[in-house]
Amino acid sequence: MFGVYSDGTLDPSYAAYNGLLALQHRGQESCGIAVNDKGVISYYKDMGLVTEVFSHEILDRLRGQMSVGHVRYSTAGASVRENAQPLVMRYIKGTLAIAHNGNLTNAFELHQLLAKQGSIFQTTIDTEVFAYMIARERVEAPSIEEAVHRAVKKVHGSYSMVMMSPQKLIGVRDVHGFRPLCIGKINNSYVFASETCALDACGAEFVRDVLPGEIVVADENGLRSIRDEVTEKKSLCVFEYIYFARTDSVIDGISVYEARKKAGRLLARQNPVDADIVIGVPESGIDAAIGYSEESGIPYQKGIVKNSYIGRTFIKPSQSERETSVRIKLNSLHTAVKGKRVVMLDDSIVRGTTSARIVSMLKEAGAKEVHLRISSPPFLWPCYYGTDIPSKDDLIACQHSIEEIGKMSFADSIDFLKLENLPKMLDVSGIGCSGICDACFSGKYPAEIPNYLVAQKNYDYCTPIKRL
């Protein structure tokens, strides 16, 4: 997500475009930008990458003083154009544009309540449910921010959101802080973004992270905050550091790059191995490989070449798409690995097919040995907060032991980062770390999960209409 309230320093549409380019790693299914011109909101969105959807001609038509942008990776709702964000909704008090990162765990109950009261849904995503809740509250609330304040008390689960009313840009983060959201500033222009790398892309200076349970509002009077007392423990998704976030981002004061290097160092200490070189699977595995090399003394080399024009395989909607992407995305560097004992660092193993493909590729290139090291613990539980971790039936670690996973991956040895080392991974400053969600590894969910979600994880909130 990306949002701009401009004093004239930033062009909102082009700033949003640049911000979304920096955030493209977070989703490649669809994207969109909405712009507010003195209370009139216009937008454009479609399936595809930012560079595929937007042109200079389109951006030049999106003129205004505020903008909200979004890149989508679906965890609830079908991968269709209707579900692209931001959602732009017209209601009795005006127009609202909203972009959302996360999953509402009580969206089904809210959807049923609203549907029985006559609400008509145009999408199958939980974001629309949230938008309806805000619109309902706004009828009686004295301001849009108060409507948001009231609505967030009725929704559960994970949400970082950026939204735009005719007069204001609003950012909100759930009480657990599952998903990141930060604030930047350039002159008197304010920027809200999922990661700090997007602030850098538009020249904004980092101000601070939005706190769990906080609502921030930017308008002609500057920036202000609304926050009730928060009793829930902070639970930032640890997978942000392992995989999701870009290497050059800093989330809640912790450098993603340093955290990934720390994971590599911890793996080198856990289970040392004799080898000739250390390599990383691009992109997030590279940082862990550098840390492993520094700790072990085994030289780091580039052993895998990435085709930069292929999206991230983890967030492809289907398994067949993921497998096809791996085949054309990665290739071994034969001269680097031939005749060598190789330690290969990767960020995670979900279903196991990707790892087997990469290890086989390295051995076909002449590697004598391939020792697989994973900079996260084994996935044992599904995620209900916005990461597309599948049901336990599809998680390889739920069906096989670590030794069996190693054999199925054709690796000569395998090791995962130990669960107890996750807090150490994020303790990059030596002062300790707390407040992470590791439910997909530990099964300890910080927020209650309704029984229907446990029974049917990938529930669409209403049946999508088939497009001809």
Image (cartoon, grey):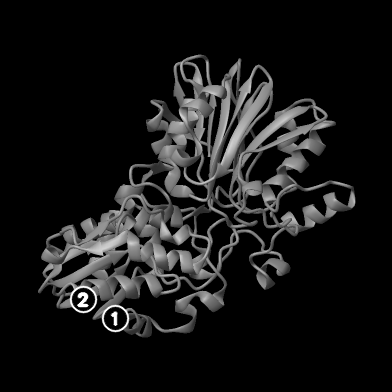
167 displayed left or right of 439: right
Secondary structure state at the residue bearing disc 1: loop
Query: What residue is pinned by disc 2?
Result: 363
Q: Residue furthest front?
A: 468
In this rendering, the answer to whether 205 lies above or below 259 is: above
Q: Are marks 2 and 1 in contact (CB under 8 Å)?
A: yes
Choose mark 2 or mark 1, whichever is in front.
2
Q: Quadrant of residue 263?
A: bottom left
Q: Which residue is drawn at 60% across and 61% down?
A: 384
Q: Residues within 10 Å of mark 2 (few under 14, many from 20)?
A: many
In percent of width and height, residue 142 lies at 79, 25
Question: Crowding at label 1, few (<14), some or many (≥20) Cα neighbours within 10 Å?
Answer: many
Q: Which residue is drawn at 50% across and 28% down?
A: 191
Which image quarter is the C terminus in?
bottom right
Residue 283, relative to residue 250: is it above or below? below
**Residue 200 or residue 32, whichever sits in front:** 32
Q: How far apart are marks 2 and 1 (CA)?
A: 9 Å
Q: Mark 2 is on which residue type? A: Lys
Q: Residue 271 versus residue 121: which sits nearer the camera?
A: 121
Residue 418 disc label: none
Q: Name the residue under label 1.
A: 410
